[in-house]
């Protein structure tokens, strides 16, 4: 490419993709690329352009390949996009493969010695002399590896037309408090930018143009949003065990708790957080704390839920509250623990042995991660039962733009708890008596003085007075009341949301599939296939879900697992409509994209 | 509280012993576990325990059924097999004013629940952790547990070839500050230790040899009443003086050693056999190992260190129960949310 002396003016042609593209950055895990990628994402965000970022990382601390995609979308689509308009290839190990997969015409920034331009002629290649630039911009050789990444941020900013002032601001924000690092990284980004100014011409394939779409928005990941929800919900006991992708939920909670959960009068903590020896113990802590009247939670992923399942079944039968986050990942043990899936749907719906049905919440965006977390603690205490908040790696660990969270003004619902005076006045109180006909009994808390309300808690073999019983009629009374309680939950859990285009064809998705589902709905409509979209937000299914299933001729049910787990729950709940559900599936460990939904629905329609 | 009959004396709280009982036991007649239940009732009565503050936890097993048989005024939680310690941990954090009693078996704690035992002790969870140790799984009809002695045999004739896990040395190793071994057939010693246990702040580990009359009381068993009686070596005579009584009790100087608890209560220890110092951790380990080699049960207060901070202190928790904290204290203000949102912009 020839040198371009002029300052970058946003050149635009008829085919220029303005604020509508994907960039994929290929780097090596542990090389500091996460900071560089977040800076680039933030800088575009600060330009007023809607962006989302997805980190595709290995289960490894350093050395394995990692990819980060940044999607900018003027229309506000935030799902992963199947094609990329720009590639930044920093990892020699994967560069050949990456370039082989590149979409025709893509801009490719890479390290000059890799000579990738020899491999394909249908791409716009931008070789960059990284080593030379690094040496010139950073005097300390041991920091070279880190600043190298910041150089591509500078180069990409010039190519895309991102204002360097925004890049510098983003670096300062990202490295807040570390003045030396800020300076070093700003210099490196500038070096990349200056080199690109001198050596690269303007291009008009993809451009970032200042917009006002992100005014007042925040960038946050779902784990942080959930942690904040738990903080404002007044969570007081946490028992947890580290597991990707759930750890940062509690770790972020700990950071916030250290600031906002200190009693101003005594300087002491108003929350107990214990890293337990495993998930079995974490579940024990959560349920016993809930039983004793605290608001308790844990955060885990599929393998942890499996370990907790004996306790969760007990929690269901003894009716002890607790909030269980499942930030889902791809399958067991080693393999793809750092990839995303919605593959614990059935596990969490029915977790444990015996007849069990659990309330599950499926937040579909950052505001809901926050709000549903807040609500989960109310639901746990109202229904005296384990509540699952089911997210996944995509929601939990990726960067999302979001409206700032509304302050949760609703007072805490501490449920049916009798205090000393109420116990003294109660006639013939029984721990498991269904006084109100809603299946929810009244409970007492250990340590309540006055000599009333003490009871003995044990599994399924009890009568309404919590006395040991093996009588069939007592057991039936327990399980049938629990079913009634679950029915009652239908009027408490979040209702589904609709995006109707006026059609008898239904589209149904939940959780992290939502952005891709919306985008697919638009693409399909443009192609002449209208759908009504229901976004499911909870189990049990509410009346609105019943109506939708009844009305629609067909329901395309989008989910990220192999077996159509949510479809199974639907077929089981609505056996008379079982044939209406057509599964649209995505389960390779990458976040779902709109194209795969469009393709599958189109194929169904052509049958 | 039941109406006291004139004959039954009341404790300082005005309760009679009857106020500390539970439902009727359904264990086999003669089961060692029932004798332990009787001593818990006695000690709680004599220690003036407020029943409503008691939280009882257990796993699964015959032993784990017993919390239903004492202190009906307290709350009980019969949880799942081997997981009692995490329950006690959770509840003790939710409400640090509870008096936690965990009852477990040798199978519950030394087989399926070893992990939770180890970590609860390590964290110094505020609880009395009782292992009713009969060397077998009673409830599942007599299989060996991990405390069964090497060479001991089942009724069926099967011989245990594996070395036992000893809860006491394990607990001392883990830093437990109150470790005792007792025999359900020695109520006097057990009673004194239980009373001291009620005054202690962190984890108390009590390994109580408790014969299973149905599955492990035959001649070839090392946990039969006869065998344990013959091999029981009480280390000392113990007296326990509650803080409220310290002023009134005259303790003979000389042969009796006093250990003082943070609340002012005292344990009076009068050595019987040898110069055993229960404050000497390494000495205790050595003595226990030596006695085990000889096939004896050293019983009494094996190790005591009264000043270790319990978990709520380690976590710097507020003094009032977390469970009763009010929304006004727990929910940060709108200004806080605003600041957090601004930082994320
Ligand atoms: C997960 C699980 N596995 C197995 C059992 C069956 N089980 C019930 S009690 C018990 C052993 C109890 O032995 P121990 O703790 O020594 O109590 P003991 O009956 O001897 O007092 C077993 C294996 C169970 N209840 N749960
Ligand atoms: S089986 Fe053994 S442990 Fe169980 S109640 Fe009978 S004697 Fe006690
Ligand atoms: Mg046993």
Image: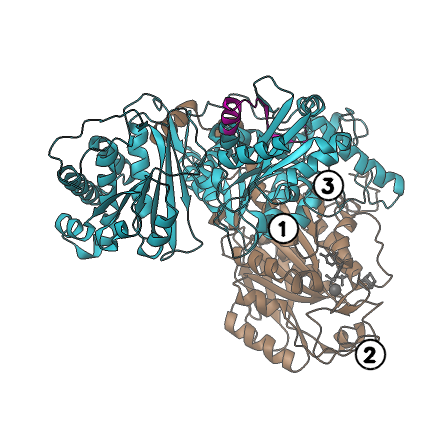
In the image, residue B47 lies in the stretch drawn in magenta: no
Pinpoint residue A282: horizontal percent, then vertical percent. Answer: 58, 49
Pinpoint residue B191: horizontal percent, then vertical percent. Answer: 70, 59
Alpha-carbon distance for marks 2 and 1?
38 Å
Left or right placement of residue A596 versus residue A21 in this view: right
Alpha-carbon distance for marks 3 and 1?
14 Å
Residue for badge 1: A306
Graded by Cα atoms within 10 Å as few (under 14), some (14 to 19) or many (20 or more), the crowding at tag 2 reads few
- Chain letter of the residue carrying label 3: A
Pinpoint residue A491: horizontal percent, then vertical percent. Answer: 68, 23
Left or right placement of residue A20 versus residue A293 in this view: left
* Residue B325 appears in the picture as rendered: no
Where in the image, quadrant-wise, is ligand 1 located? Answer: bottom right
Numbered-mark total: 3
Q: Quadrant of the N terminus of chain A?
A: top left
Furthest-left residue in view? A5
- Chain letter of the residue carrying label 2: B
B222 vs B241, nearest the viewer: B222
- Chain letter of the residue carrying label 1: A
Task: Residue A356: give its label.
Answer: 3
Graded by Cα atoms within 10 Å as few (under 14), some (14 to 19) or many (20 or more), the crowding at tag 1 reads some
Residue for badge 2: B157
Give, as a single range, the part of the protein colored magenta.
A520-541
Q: Disc 2 or disc 3, which is closer to the eye?
A: 3
For label 3, being within 8 Å of ligand 1 is answered no
Specify the colour of chain B.
brown
């Amino acid at each position: 490419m020839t040198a371009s002396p002029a300052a970058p003016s946003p050149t635009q042609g008829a085919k220029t993709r303005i604020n509508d593209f994907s960039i994929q950055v290929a780097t090596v895990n542990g090389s500091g690329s996460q900071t560089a990628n977040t800076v680039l994402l933030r800088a575009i965000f600060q330009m007023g352009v809607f962006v989302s970022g997805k980190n595709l990382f290995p289960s490894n601390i350093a050395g394995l390949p990692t990819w980060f995609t940044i999607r900018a979308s003027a229309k506000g689509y935030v799902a992963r996009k199947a094609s990329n308009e720009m590639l930044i290839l920093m990892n020699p190990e994967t560069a050949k493969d990456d370039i082989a997969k590149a979409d025709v015409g893509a801009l490719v920034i890479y390290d000059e010695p890799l000579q990738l331009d020899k491999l394909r002629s249908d791409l716009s290649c931008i070789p960059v002399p990284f080593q030379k630039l690094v040496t010139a911009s950073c005097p300390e050789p041991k920091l070279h590896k880190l600043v190298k990444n910041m150089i591509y941020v500078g180069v990409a900013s010039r190519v895309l037309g991102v204002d360097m002032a925004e890049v510098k601001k983003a670096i300062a924000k990202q490295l807040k408090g570390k003045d030396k690092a800020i300076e070093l990284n700003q210099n490196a980004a500038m070096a990349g930018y200056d080199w690109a100014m001198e050596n690269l011409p303007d291009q008009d394939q993809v451009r970032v143009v200042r917009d006002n779409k992100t005014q007042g928005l925040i960038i946050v990941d779902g784990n942080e949003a959930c942690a904040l929800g738990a903080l404002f919900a007044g969570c007081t006991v946490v028992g947890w065990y580290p597991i990707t992708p759930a750890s940062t939920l509690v770790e972020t909670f700990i950071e916030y708790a250290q600031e906002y959960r200190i009693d101003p009068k005594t300087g002491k903590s108003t929350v107990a957080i214990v890293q337990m020896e495993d998930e079995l113990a974490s579940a024990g802590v959560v349920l016993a704390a809930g039983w004793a009247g605290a608001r308790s939670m844990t955060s885990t992923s599929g393998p942890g839920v499996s370990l907790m399942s004996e306790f969760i079944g007990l929690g269901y039968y003894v009716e002890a509250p607790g909030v269980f986050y499942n930030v889902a990942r791809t399958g067991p043990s080693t393999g793809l623990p750092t990839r995303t899936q919605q593959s614990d749907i059935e596990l969490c719906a029915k977790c444990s042995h015996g007849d069990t049905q659990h309330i599950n919440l499926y937040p579909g965006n950052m505001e809901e991660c926050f709000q549903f977390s807040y609500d989960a603690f109310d639901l746990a205490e109202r229904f005296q039962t384990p509540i699952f908040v089911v997210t996944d790696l995509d929601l939990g660990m990726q960067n999302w733009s979001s409206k700032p969270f509304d302050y949760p003004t609703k007072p805490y619902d501490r449920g049916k708890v009798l205090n000393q005076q109420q116990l003294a006045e109660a006639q013939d109180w029984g721990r498991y008596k269904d006084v109100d006909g809603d299946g929810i009994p009244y409970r007492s808390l250990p340590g309540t003085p006055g000599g009333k309300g003490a009871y003995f808690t044990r599994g399924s073999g009890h009568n309404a007075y919590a006395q040991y019983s093996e009588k069939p009629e007592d057991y039936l009374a327990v399980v049938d009341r629990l079913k009634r309680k679950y029915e009652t939950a239908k009027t408490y859990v979040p209702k589904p949301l609709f995006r109707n285009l006026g059609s008898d064809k239904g589209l149904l998705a939940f959780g992290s599939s939502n952005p891709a589902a919306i985008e697919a709905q638009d693409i399909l409509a443009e192609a002449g296939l209208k759908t009504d979209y229901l976004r499911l937000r909870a189990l049990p299914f509410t009346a609105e879900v019943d109506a939708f299933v009844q009305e629609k001729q067909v329901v395309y049910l989008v989910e990220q697992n192999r077996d159509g787990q949510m479809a199974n729950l639907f077929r089981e709940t609505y056996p008379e409509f079982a044939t209406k559900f057509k599964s649209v599936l995505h389960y390779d460990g990458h976040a779902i994209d709109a194209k795969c939904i469009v393709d599958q629905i189109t194929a169904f329609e052509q049958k | 509280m039941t109406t006291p009959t004139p004959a039954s004396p009341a404790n300082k709280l005005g309760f009679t012993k009857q106020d500390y009982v539970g439902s009727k036991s359904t264990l086999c007649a003669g089961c060692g576990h029932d004798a332990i239940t009787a001593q818990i009732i006695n000690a709680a009565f004599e220690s003036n325990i407020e029943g409503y503050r008691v939280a009882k936890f257990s796993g699964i097993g015959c032993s784990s059924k017993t919390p239903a048989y004492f202190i009906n005024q307290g709350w009980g939680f019969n949880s799942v097999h081997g997981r009692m310690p995490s329950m006690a941990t959770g509840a003790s954090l939710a409400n640090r004013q509870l008096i936690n009693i965990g009852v477990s078996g040798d199978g519950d704690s030394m087989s399926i629940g070893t992990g939770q035992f180890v970590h609860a002790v390590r964290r110094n969870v505020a609880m009395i952790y009782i292992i009713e140790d009969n060397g077998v799984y009673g409830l599942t009809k007599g299989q060996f547990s991990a405390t069964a002695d090497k060479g001991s045999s089942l009724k069926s004739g099967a011989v245990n070839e594996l070395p036992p896990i000893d809860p006491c040395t394990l607990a001392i190793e883990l830093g437990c500050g109150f470790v005792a071994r007792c025999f359900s057939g020695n109520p006097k010693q057990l009673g004194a230790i239980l009373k001291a246990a009620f005054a202690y702040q962190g984890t108390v580990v009590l390994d109580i040899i408790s014969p299973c009359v149905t599955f492990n009381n035959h001649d070839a068993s090392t946990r039969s009443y006869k065998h344990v009686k013959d091999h029981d070596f009480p280390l000392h005579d113990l007296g326990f003086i509650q803080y409220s009584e310290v002023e009134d009790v005259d303790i003979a100087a000389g042969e009796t050693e006093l250990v003082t608890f943070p609340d002012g209560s005292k344990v009076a220890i009068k050595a019987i056999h040898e110069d055993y110092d229960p404050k000497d951790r390494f000495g205790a380990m050595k003595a226990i190992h030596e006695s085990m080699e000889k096939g004896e049960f050293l019983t009494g207060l094996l190790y005591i260190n009264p000043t270790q901070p319990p978990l709520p202190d380690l976590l710097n928790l507020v003094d009032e129960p977390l469970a009763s904290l009010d929304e006004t204290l727990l929910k940060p203000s709108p200004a806080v949310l605003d600041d957090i949102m601004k930082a994320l912009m």
